[in-house]
Image: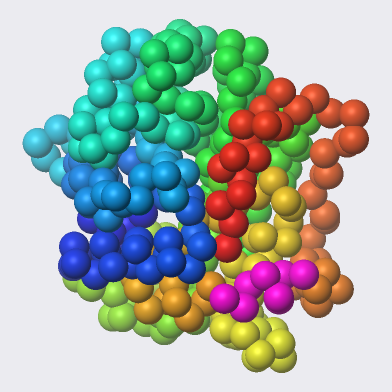
Amino acid sequence: MGMSEFYGTTDEGESIATIQRALELGVDFLDTADMYGAGANERLVGRAIAGRREQVVLATKFGIVRGEDPMDRRISGRPEYVQEACEASLRRLEVDHIDLYYQHRVDPQVPIEETVGAMARLVEQGKVRHLGLSEAAPDTIRRAHAVHPICALQTEYSLWSRDPEEEVLPTVRALGIGFVAYSPLGRGFLTGQIQSPDDLAPDDFRRAHPRFTGDNFRRNLELVDRVREIAAERGVTPGQLAQAWVLHRGEDIVPIPARSAGPISRRTSPLTRFACRPRSWRVSTRRRRTARRPASATRTCRRSTAEWRSARW
């Protein structure tokens, strides 16, 4: 949720209006983190959902610790920090529990069993309902899941970021873990609205992102042109096409896109209609199909995952 940092100038009023508009449209899964705006985004979300807590499946993350310098960041999975971070998030969000609590990045200095053990104690205390991981490797996911059921893994996944198809998606599907796809619109590139680096604000972090610079930018524009052609054939926007592609990859995948009120209202309503036409995707899914979860696979988190999986666009 880049409403408080990273993507240029922020507007708290517009951001709150965006969240509330999303709730009106039936979006009920909100995903933030304590490092976004150094806590500012959690406070914003808390204000946006005031009086509407029961409408929301609320997720946040811990693990990226920031210093006074905005670029000073470190990873912490220490058990004592897990407790402190959760309590701080609860205060900023102004809620008494978090529905889905992720470790934002795995701390290589702390065994995952210790970190997840501390997260499990938060569940016992009633401060957290379900546990998740973000950007974790398959072996780490399995070790974590052995300590306490992991109900969601968050990783970048989109038309142009398909790395999870190799090992991560098969792993979480075998364990019955849901998958949350961040940046399903390629950080905005796949919407076709960015035609030049000059379209980005001077302080937009994407100006330093490899996909948005130099020859990479020009080559990626060619890919987006093809996305635009396919979208036009089907009477939708490039953003709708890109997001519906992610939705079509499986019932266990929940994308978390958007940051401004306009794009949410324009690209939400047609998605269900469009995503329900599987044959229309053959032209844009030439890569190997992802492994499907076998019927006999374990579903330790089936019930709990379904609670937040219902937050679909």
Coordinates of residue 308 in the picture (x, y in percent):
56, 42
Q: Is residue 276 left or right of residue 119?
A: right
Does residue 43 sit above or below 114 in this rendering? Answer: below
Give the colouring mode of the picture.
rainbow
Q: In the picture, residue 11 is in which quadrant?
A: bottom left
Q: Nearer the viewer, residue 199 or 51?
A: 51
Coordinates of residue 56 in the picture (x, y in percent):
43, 48
Q: Is residue 161 left or right of residue 292?
A: left
Q: Quadrant of the N terminus?
A: bottom left
* Residue at left offset 57%, top offset 76%: 269
* Residue at left offset 31%, top offset 16%: 83
Prevalent SS, magenta region: helix
How many labels were placed on the picture?
A: 0
* Residue at left offset 31%, top offset 80%: 199
Task: Work out whether residue 282 can be spotted.
Answer: no
Does residue 22 sit above or below 99 in this rendering? Answer: below
Does residue 283 sit above or below 88 in this rendering? Answer: below
Is residue 76 within the magenta segment? no
Residue interval drawn in magenta: 269-276
Q: In the picture, residue 270 is in which quadrant?
A: bottom right
Coordinates of residue 305 in the picture (x, y in percent):
63, 36
Does residue 104 sit above or below 186 in this rendering? Answer: above
Q: Quadrant of the C terminus?
A: bottom right
Q: Is residue 12 left or right of residue 34?
A: left
Q: Nearer the viewer, residue 173 or 26?
A: 26
Task: Work out whether residue 147 can be spotted.
Answer: yes
Farthest residue to the left: give it. Answer: 68
* Residue at left offset 42%, top offset 25%: 128
Q: In the picture, residue 164 is in which quadrant?
A: top right
